[in-house]
Image: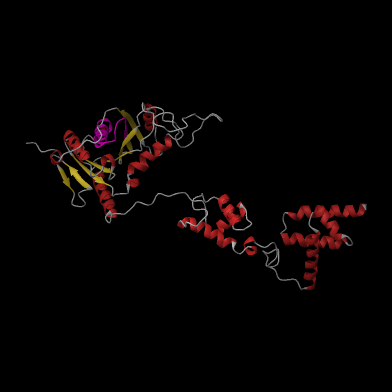
Amino acid sequence: MQERAAREAEIRDRYVNLKSSLTERARRLFVANEAIAFGYGGIVAAARATGMAPSVIGKGIAEVRAIEDGTAPNLAVTRSRRPGGGRKKTTEKDPTLLPDLRALIESTTRGDPESPLLWTARSQRNIVAALRKQGHQTSKNMVARLLKQLGYSLQANRKRLEGAQHPDRNAQFEHINEMIRRQLEAKEPVISVDTKKKELVGPYKNGGRELRAKGDPEDVNVHDFIDPEQRKAAPYGVYDLAENEAWVSVGLSHDTGEFAVQTIRTWWKEMGAARYPDASSLMITADGGGSNGYRLRLWKLELQGLVDELGFSITVCHLPPGTSKWNKIEHRLFSFITKNWRGKPLVTHQVIVSLIAATTTKTGLTVRARIDDRAYAKGRRVSDKQLALVNLEPDAFHGEWNYTVHPTPTS
């Protein structure tokens, strides 16, 4: 008995030393050879020493003898089992599983009213439940593998649908780029303007996470009900394309054309005049809508007042409809402001101003900001007579999008 135990221990030691470097087939053949060399009771001894099932060792012995006889199948180097060996795939035992899974997913994509998943989230848990109702034996892991096999993966929504595209959309972009190039070559200022999303002011949840002591998150309101005593903040920005500088006025009133032009006026007084003392023109790129929209009469009337103050012309180029995301100010200023105040409740207007002014980038962006507490009337109308006073010269190419406001002629 002691001799058998010692031999089993030797088999165990050899197997442990080689196991990690052997393939499944090589392990099977190795243990089979050990069982043959052991002699009588070798299968039982090898099974105790290695933990391999006696049936597997028996198959290994048969394979070893077939190799010795030259009758063994010629397996590829990468295979450990003969073709057809091993447990059958679930999709082979249940041929309708894959087609039913595909039908479930595709019907929810197309909006098939007969789909059991139409009004549920297409999660693996719901898919498993739907398949089980159809009589399939499956699990979340199996569904995950099958979905991957079908080419499905977790996907978020992507903002790409812009509605009907104007036929001259690309031509307008080329026109804007050419106008900017000429203006910058002449060392004249070019700015991009827009209003950032209005923000709730108070202890409200702000997206993102910020470093704090573990287990000590900042408490905010459960509901985002607007505080009537705290007005929303409307940040309107002016971004200098050449100097990578920006000005942001945080408005407490309505976002109107008057507010937009007043912010440009403030930028010029605080930053632009010192940066461009010899300026003889100004170019503005803006969205097609909002407080600086190309259809807004008040925007053009207020621009005339600014032009008369500055004493030189202002050229405006609007981005084509549905392309506001391409406005330079969006991804060169506003996106970094959002990153800078992530996870921080915007509890007061002054906090908003401080966070905006603290925004920087690796490319050297500098931002200045201030609260604009003026009251801007909403719904202010501009008559035809007032609009006629605007000394506006439309461009030959889409004059509704591209125009220049000249100083009012003196009598």
**Place of residue 46 in the rendered image (x, y in percent of width and height, measured from the top left):** 83, 57
Q: Bounds of the magenta span? A: 247-273
On the question of residue 63 being in view, the answer is yes
Q: Residue furthest left?
A: 411
Give whichever of 292, 6 is nearer the camera: 292
Tell me where residue 268 sits by quadrant: top left
Image point 89% across, 62% down: which residue?
Answer: 40
Image point 72% across, 56% down: which residue?
Answer: 21
Q: Residue furthest right?
A: 1
On the question of residue 151 being in view, the answer is no
Tell me where residue 333 sits by quadrant: top left
**Place of residue 203 in the rendered image (x, y in percent of width and height, measured from the top left):** 44, 29
The answer to whether 259 appears left or right of 43 in the picture is left
Q: Is residue 329 above or below residue 373?
A: below
**Place of residue 160 in the rendered image (x, y in percent of width and height, measured from the top left):** 39, 51
The answer to whether 110 appears left or right of 318 in the picture is right
The answer to whether 205 appears left or right of 327 in the picture is right
Q: Is residue 10 above or below residue 304?
A: below
Image point 90% across, 55% down: which residue?
Answer: 4
